[in-house]
Amino acid sequence: MGDSRDPAGGPWVLGVDSGGSGVRVALAPAGPAGAAGGSPGPASAATPLAAASLAADDRPAVTGPRGIDAASLMERVHPLVERLTAAAGADRIAAACVGAAGMATLGDDLRDRLPDALAAAFGVRRLALAGDAVTAYAGALGLRPGVVVAAGTGMIALGASADGDGHEGAGAWRRADGWGHLLGDAGGGAWIGRAGLDAAMRAHDGRAGGSMALMAAARERFGPLDAMPAQLYPRPDRAAVLASFAPEVGRAAGDDPVAAGILRQAAAHILESAAAVRPGAGPVDVALAGGLFRMGEPLLGPLRAQAERLLPGAVLVPAAGGPLDGALLIARALRHGRLPLPADPRLLTLTDRPGP
Amino acid sequence: MGDSRDPAGGPWVLGVDSGGSGVRVALAPAGPAGAAGGSPGPASAATPLAAASLAADDRPAVTGPRGIDAASLMERVHPLVERLTAAAGADRIAAACVGAAGMATLGDDLRDRLPDALAAAFGVRRLALAGDAVTAYAGALGLRPGVVVAAGTGMIALGASADGDGHEGAGAWRRADGWGHLLGDAGGGAWIGRAGLDAAMRAHDGRAGGSMALMAAARERFGPLDAMPAQLYPRPDRAAVLASFAPEVGRAAGDDPVAAGILRQAAAHILESAAAVRPGAGPVDVALAGGLFRMGEPLLGPLRAQAERLLPGAVLVPAAGGPLDGALLIARALRHGRLPLPADPRLLTLTDRPGP
């Protein structure tokens, strides 16, 4: 099928990743239809950014009374895309995917106004608006059923099924955890760091369950432990402070049974979340996405060791790419007319505009 | 020993309890020497307030750059004491104890200026400045060695030993936990409530470890669980919100094994903290103070069931009284010339001024 017969009308696709630290955009050739995902391995997700040109703005889109403000997001995106299209000699963008943190709960204005705005500015006819968990899913695992656990400071698991009759948007998303450091995020960075500091304070007090190694690490990092409460509680970024201690737990785990126990428990919680969202009981790929897994063996070992018990039939795979890769993959699939991921009124909405 | 031979020179004593919700004072006859504590049972602590007149100001003392401001505390205390002394016909106050939340870390100005201020205003010659944990200890257990665990939203254990040669102020205080809801307070109200909400969110997600009973209770109390993070995280009183769910865990524990497991774990943590501060390995009374224990059997049962294993030789006793009782007890002991509690530069300092 040549470009002249392509109903979407153009060889370029756009990916956008909007979050708390700013907005990133990627422009790429739509590529041949076969590159749009749906292949069984994660390799299909590994390449999008390699072929793309990138631009970023470190000012996040503004959130107002109607949620994330569409005009504010367009203000960020517009000059970035103009720059990229000019440099690439791209005349028209056939399809785009905008992934945004908060799309599910704060995305009404984006859903109302972005389709017109992107059509007017760049001729975008097919558009996907996705939660950042969905673009993270696609970036990590591609456009196929499975499970992605995304773990950084927090922890969330997202599963996609392909059941139903196979038409575009069939199947369903399932989500587990992601409730923040006081209500859940079990096994994430803040959870691990908090458990590590709990063990440090226990050693400091002479209580059961303490770890001298973690006490020493906490003193090294934060100073006298008596002053920890005064240091931690007034800060707005408490969860990040807790998560900053997670690598110390990883470093201690080789020699310290308390630290090793914390990571064994964290791995179990991550697997429990994955199990809650798996699409059916059959074999499933579970992609591990997010910065927490850079801890390496101290966490990956306990994940592998407990996977067969808590998540039978699963294959743990590293994430192939990030959310911007995922946005490009979704845009490419749209351009070629088929997106095998489940549509969802909050997590993934599609707009298809007739041609001019 | 009659009042005419009393070196402290007066039959009245004053107790002050200063905290975040205001200032309370109690004026009482010093009573016979034998009522000053040191007796083996908690009964000696049960009576002080019954014989006292009380007054309160719901404005807390101001905390400034030097910590709790002595002038501000005197501003609150002065009219209250004048009112009580006038009503009681008390001419002079022989001894006083001021217990204040934050005395340990924010008490420098109080230690510098309160002795002169109270001497000038009311002729107070013997003064004890105590952390609120110390007055809570004395109120709960009296003036004898032992352990007090104080549990409300938070959880702290305080132990006092009587080792040394028996002179006034010998022995030492030991403290465990009290590190707040992110670093510890293990087994306290916020800890129990948070564990209960974790189990509610697990049931909501279909994760392992969930409780349908706690999920239902959380919905009843907080509304749709998807909205819990947006409700909880912006609030400044997050720990109190978490603790507000602890009674639901207590109510569910009769039928729900997850809730029962949370309270068993909470009881274990409380006993671990008590064990860390016990004065020696011999028999010891452990007083349970604070609002959390009003939960009753769902928590007291697991405490008793695990005490012999985690805290061998301990007898769990209910708190005889509160912090203001404790302040009066300490003031009475001072007036009679002997305070058998350990002196400590931050937790309990004594001033003895020569007579006129």
Image (cartoon, coloured by chain):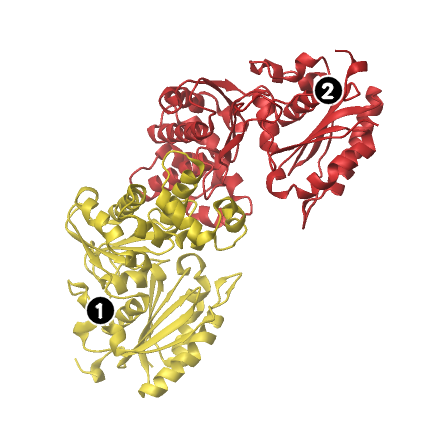
Chain colours: A yellow, B red
Give residue A336's quadrant in the image. Answer: bottom left
**Image quadrant occupied by the N terminus of chain B:** top right
x, y percent for residue B127: 71, 30
Question: Looking at the rendered structure, which numbered label has been put on residue B52?
Answer: 2
- Residue sitting nearer the eye, B85 or A353: B85
**Residue A139 at x, y = what percent?**
27, 65
Q: Amino acid at mark 1?
A: Ala
User: Do badges 1 and 2 share one subunit?
Assistant: no
Question: Which three-letter amino acid code belongs to the residue tagged 2?
Answer: Ala
Q: Label 1, on which residue?
A: A46
Q: Judging from the image, what secondary structure is the residue with disc 1 in? A: loop
The x and y percentages for residue A251 are 31, 52
Is residue A355 something one can see in this rendering?
no
Image side of residue B326 versus residue A55, left or right = right
Q: Residue at x 33, y 52 (%)?
A: A156
Against A60, is B275 above or below? above
In this picture, residue A109 sits left or right of residue B170: left
